[in-house]
Amino acid sequence: MLRITKTITVARSAKDCFLYLSDVRKLIEWDPAVSDARKDSSGPVAKGSYFTVRVTIGAISVPFRYIITEHAPSRRIVIAGRSALLNVNDTIELSESDGNTTISYRAEFHFKFGLERLLSSLPDAVDRQCQLAVDGLARALTDTADEAAISQRNAKADSHTLGALRNFTRHGYVAGRRDWAPMSERIEGRHVLLTGANSGIGLAAAIELAWAGAKLTLVVRDEAKAAQTAQTIEEATGRRDIRFEFAELSLLGDTEALVDRLLARKEDIDVLINNAGALFNDHTTTAEGLEKSYALLLLSPWRLSEGLLPLLQNHGSKARIINVVSGGMYAERLNLKRLNMKAEGYRGALAYAQCKRALSVMTETWAERWREQNIVVNAMHPGWSDTPGVQKSLPLFRRFTRLVLRSHTEGADTIIWMAQSNQAALSTGKLFLDREPRSTYLLGNNVESEKERAALEPLLRRDFEVTLKSTS
């Protein structure tokens, strides 16, 4: 047996450190030997939670099965790892004093097949690896990252169509996370308003933000969806304090009523995530007379962002607006005549792409307008994710791409980062994919005219006001 002990002290609370360390998935952020980590058990992280962690030992990649055997909040974690080559028991103890936390890490390695005797240099190599890991942990718990920038790898890939499209797949997520700064921030008490939260990437984001401590208000259509969503989040995180607002966001009357209720509550909003959406293959007109894509994907987030401004502006920390768009917009140039499309010539994918293109334009407009009001406004697209919308509306696309589609959590990752990370608050007016800013126009194509761009917001305002007036 080989025993190694390391100690670090960081300027974080023991609670913060414990929550970060007990989520074994986070190993990939601070241990350079770890190339993948996933949680396999259901429920919140606790004693008995188990994970699969892939560790590189020399030229060999070895999967470990990790299980938490002791879980004493803010004080002690014991994790047992098992693999074909060795077993390891990690004991992590925490003590807090004067705002600092001392973390004592003790690892016991039990090598198989006589490896410890065969390789005389093994103890020194393992000790160096452990030192790299605890150094990485110290950085993860203390460092402040610079503003996010596109990596050379992704800049090169985005310079040609096939490379850019490949980045939309799970490959882009897996390759990108090698360069990401750690995200150890907690967001207890930070109020996050999230639309479209009952399925797909919206639900995945809600679960992760609940785990990070956010005070969540989730917008869903009805009580049945709220009950199902609340149960899913509770089973995953143990949280039972999620609040819900009911609204059919394709109806502008419902959207306006939601704005009124939130304003009446007078509770600051730290993060607004405009995620609700769907792709409608068949032309559908709402009860208010609008094409449904236009109402749900564009007019609703426009009104929420504008209407909730008093709750977002000029409070303690920078407020954030996150607009979820789509890589499909790259194929379309903004054309106001293709918003609120008529039945003749309607194509669901085109209507969807036009609305997302318009929302990306509004993202840049708002970012400039609200910069001095302590609000950052950014857009993101989740890549190609295996969402219920893709399964229902794009079955042929899914048939050909299902092996490379992202999971819901992978698609939601950039939303979570934009809501939680201090690094994300350094940028405004940008489009993100995999935590990196990307061009809004693929290869410089489909750039709208300044005239079309300037005419967008007056059109949205007019259509919103006319619709509300005609239905009141």
Image (spheres, rainbow, N blue to C red):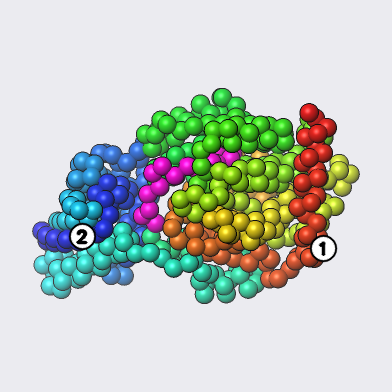
Q: Position of residue 283 (x, y in %)?
A: 80, 39
Q: Amino acid at mark 2?
A: Thr
In reply to whether residue 197 is colored magenta, the answer given is yes
What residue is disc 2 on? 9
Residue at 65% x, 58% y: name it: 369
Q: Secondary structure at mark 2?
A: strand
Q: Residue furthest top?
A: 223
What residue is disc 1 on? 451
Q: Amino acid at mark 1?
A: Lys
Q: Residues within 10 Å of mark 1 (few under 14, many from 20)?
A: few
Q: Secondary structure at mark 1?
A: helix
Q: Position of residue 131 (x, y in %)?
A: 21, 67
Residue at 72% x, 36% y: name it: 252
In reply to whether residue 190 is colored magenta, the answer given is yes
Among the 4 quarters of the image, the one containing residue 277: top right
Of the pair 197 and 406, the residue shown nearer to us? 197
Is 317 placed left or right of 81 in the picture? right
Q: Residue furthest right?
A: 344
Of the pair 370 and 383, the residue shown nearer to us? 370
Residue at 19% x, 50% y: name it: 96
Query: In which quadrant is the C terminus drawn?
Result: top right
Q: Is residue 441 visible?
A: yes
Is 127 placed left or right of 241 in the picture? left
Residue bounds of the magenta highlight: 183-199
The tag earlier along the polypeptide, 2 or 1, is 2
Residue at 56% x, 50% y: name it: 313
